Amino acid sequence: MTATILAPGTVAELVGDAVTAPSMHNAQPWKFVFSPEGNVIELHGDPDRAMTRTDPNHRALHLGCAAALFNLRVSAVQHGLRARVRLLPDDSRPWLLATATLDGPSDEDHELAALHAALRRRHTSRFPFGDEPVPDALMDGLKSAALLEGCRLTVPGDWHIETVLGLVRDAEHREDIDPLVRAETSAWSGDTEAPAGRPGTAGTPGTRRDGIPAAAFGPRSSRGPSPVRDFGRDRPAADRGWAVFEKRPQLALLGTPADTRVDWMRAGQALERVLLQATADGLATSMTSQPLEWPELRWTVRDPLEVMGHVQMVLRLGYGPAGPETPRRSVTDVLEIRG
């Protein structure tokens, strides 16, 4: 156990790495609280940044926060520390999702340290990928990354890929005819100023530090539906252009045996581990969550030929543009240091 309290600057660096994680609509639904006594960082979910229509049970919120937790673990090892994590440590505090007690120095988890360089290079790409297949050796490495976090990553066969793409189109149609869902997506899209009422903006309008900016929308599909969400549908953006997306995207399904909050926390960490490993391997990535947002569609995403209880995320992998960096809230917005 470290006898010295971590310096505030070190804690800020750890959290700065953590918040590079992906989250639904880049809402960044997390808060961190550092207690010098014991060197403990608490990870809290932020209900003000939840998607009340498309994520009413907060499953996606848990995934995003857990991805940030994994980044915190990576950063800790990079700083010569070890993060001893407890998931959902207090039933009386449902928004306290995890605690990380930092001690060290650590000579463990060298594989985590190797992922640190990918933290700020990992970006969601809503651009077309090439047709070059992901080599089996790389895919096996991604499957191993998921297993290290207690989850499974499977590659569906051609027939099930068609099923999943059909479910994506079904989900998009449902969103088209649901004004509340469209309004929720639109609220987190585009380069509008940060609304005065948006959590984390301190009531001051200005350039927003969350959401999906127009530069990250990617081009419109010029031939049929694309395998990525179109954030520009209700937020027209100039110069998006048109492009032909891959006819048969390379998809992978990340899943867990059960569907509890603990499973969500494990899945979010596995998701980020897979995404970082893919980035380190030179792959571009995006996530296709639309059919998972509709309970009546989610079960069908599961590949019946695989031993997987519940799909937590659909990943798209391949070779193509990495995608632009998306904004992040400042560390001072998301970190509280107790006296």
Image: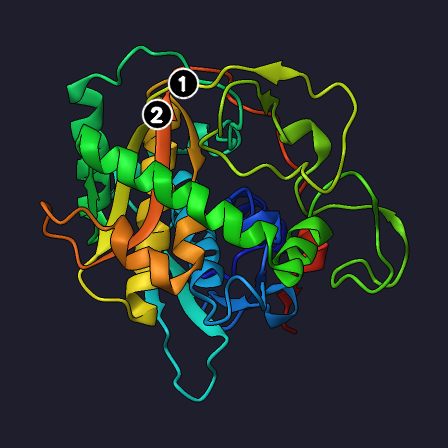
Q: Quadrant of the N terminus?
A: bottom left
What crowding class fits label 2: few (fewer than 14 Cα within 10 Å), some (14-19), or many (20 or more)?
Answer: many
Please tell me whether residue 227 is drawn above or below residue 284 in the rendered image. below
* Residue closer to the observer: 45 or 128: 128
Give the tally of numbered discs: 2
Is disc 2 placed on a helix, strand or loop? Answer: loop
- Position in image of residue 32 (x %, y %): 57, 63
Distance Cα–Cα, label 1 vs label 2: 6 Å
- At 70% from the left and 21% from the top, the residue drawn is 240
**Mark 2 sits on what residue?**
249
* Quadrant into which the C terminus falls: bottom right
| Residue 160: quadrant of the picture | top left
Q: Position of residue 130 (x, y in %)?
A: 39, 12
Viewer-side residue, 112 vs 273: 273
Q: Identify which residue is drawn at 32% across, 20% down.
A: 281
Q: Amino acid at mark 1?
A: Glu
Label 1 CA crowd tier, 10 Å (few <14, some 14–19, many 20+): some
Element at label 1: loop
* Quadrant hosting residue 234: top right
Residue 325, position as x, y percentages in the image: 62, 30
Q: Where in the figure is residue 206, as x and y percent of width and height? A: 88, 47
Q: Is residue 127 visible?
A: yes
What residue type is disc 2 on?
Pro
The foreground one among 202 and 298 is 298
Which residue position is annotated with label 1?
246
Callouts 1 and 2 close, C-beta under 8 Å: yes
